[in-house]
Amino acid sequence: MAFRELVFTVSEDLAEDLGDALMELGALSISVSDAAADTDSEKPLYGEPGLTPDRQAWEQSQVIALFDEQGLSAAEISLALTEAGFQINAPSERSVEEQDWVRLTQSQFEPIQVGQRLWVVPSWHDAPNDPNAVCLAVDPGLAFGTGSHPTTKLCMQWLEEHPDLASKTLLDYGCGSGILAIAAKRLGCGDALGVDIDPQAVISAKDNAERNEVIVDFRLPEEDSTHSQHDVVVANILANPLQVLAPALCQRIAPNGHIVLSGILERQAQEVIDTYQPWIQLHVWRECDGWVCLTGQLMADGTDQTSSDTQKKTIENSSKSIELAESAELANPSKNKKSLALIGWISLAVLMVVIVLQLFHLGRHAIALQITKTPTSIQEPLFKAFKSLDSLLCKQFSCQDIPLRDFSAWSIELANLKINAGNNQNGSNQTATGILELQIRNKSPLLITWPHVMLSITDANDAVISEKLLRPQDWLPEDDAKVTPNGSQALQEVSSNIYLSLPQQAAGFRVRLLYVDDKPRDAPSE
């Protein structure tokens, strides 16, 4: 059976309605593309998970409708559209000959050599004749991740070039087809977990794992309740969600573990590095076709090393004291035994004072903060015990709740920028207005200092054209009686609508939370 394509060129505001009307007239499928595609006037449109696209089509869009031979003629369709109120030009028509569409699709996917050993081989192809090859059987499907995109290749190359995976655990966040977790398992990785917000991606990943004869635990986020830590955390998504997920992803890295991030354009790399700076130092590991792979290692807490150094110095000092005491005892045994006892009592008193001073320095707030970093299974009983003791002590002494600064306490539940284009009257500068809908949540059972909000405004090419640093008093709602200026109460959630003046060319945005002392050097001060 042959098919016909009718191609309409319409303005942005008509594209969606026209597509709906054509479907009602019997169209088998509708596609919308830029009428200026493959020219200097072509414009990209970006959309990322969790964010509402600011534009649904191009200024001049091509709406392509596929009909079979038995459908209405082009003239009949044009007449029906005119009667429905559409004032558009007649479409161009082209025939689409019947083909073996499955074979045509398969012909577009050849085996892909990703690294020195890693290959991605579709099921309809033979494996390469290489005894050292590690072949992944992954067919193109509904989930992202076939090995052909530069970002997928970069992550797989990182896995291949780190041969110590055998003793490591791995988290693939935003797993898509599961190709990264499956590659890690084929390279000898230990336990692997994959998480994705798309149920279809989880189903596809499970099928791919079974086809490759590996065991990977693929889940939806709501099923990932343990929040386990892993030696390797890999996330191949996009720059904006990677920034939003920074606190959550860094919490999933085990001590001395690595994080591997991709889906990031070269021009976005520094911004992502700055976002992760409070938790981990990232650097560009490799670049491919304008995309980069960032990586970093989360070093173990330096406190242990400091304590070890202190203990070492204490032992050295104690050894010197013992040597002096032994020398004195040899000179005058009776007198020096009394001196030794006195030294012992003095040492014990000094030790007790040091312990008290250390506890005083550590403080009740720091203790509470450390409890929030314990595993979930023991966190609740520890907090109950701490609260009981804290209440008892505060009855005897004057206690003051001081809000803490903790990035990991915050979760961005919603961020959406509604942009209203401005007017250019009498030659004045063009401006636009917008409303930032923001909803954040304090996940911690502690009093946490309100963060600043860094809003980056981007143009249609996803380049940052303006940045606004919003202080808590700028974005906190004034009509919410539960919001106190000194900080967020435990487990508090707050929503706010912030009215803004924006550049006329504003087309997108990014949001991140920070404290003013940690803001980037080039961030505006208010």
Image (tube, grey):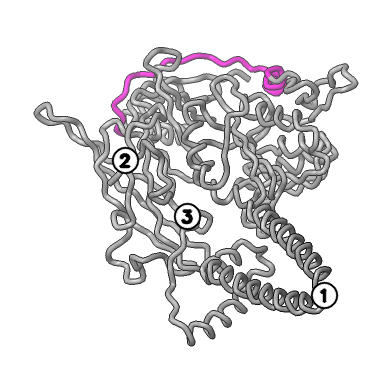
Helix, strand or loop under label 2: loop
Q: Nearer the viewer, mark 1 or mark 3?
A: 1
Where does label 2 land, which residue? 524
Q: Which residue is mark 3?
A: 413
User: Going from the N terminus, do you reach mark 2 or mark 1 first?
Assistant: 1
Label 1 vs 3, first from the N-terminus: 1
Q: Element type at marker 3? A: strand
Which residue does the image show at 69% across and 44% down from the upper left? 257
Q: Position of residue 271 (x, y in %)?
A: 46, 35
Residue 154 belongs to magenta span: no
3 vs 2, front mark: 2
- Image side of residue 11 versus residue 111, left or right: left
Q: Which is nearer the eye, 71 or 67? A: 67
Residue where numbered disc 1 is placed = 333
- Residue closer to the observer: 326 or 185: 326
- In which quarter of the view is residue 149 placed? top right
Name which residue type carries label 2.
Answer: Pro
Question: Which residue is painted at 87% across and 18% down in the image?
Answer: 130
Residue 488 found in image quarter: bottom left
**Res 45 → quadrant:** top left
Find the distance from the CA under tag 1 to the CA under tag 3. 74 Å
Task: Looking at the picture, tell me which residue is in the foreground, 302 or 71.
Answer: 302
* Figure check: 451 above or below 234: below
Magenta span includes 97:
yes
Q: Which residues are magenta?
A: 85-108
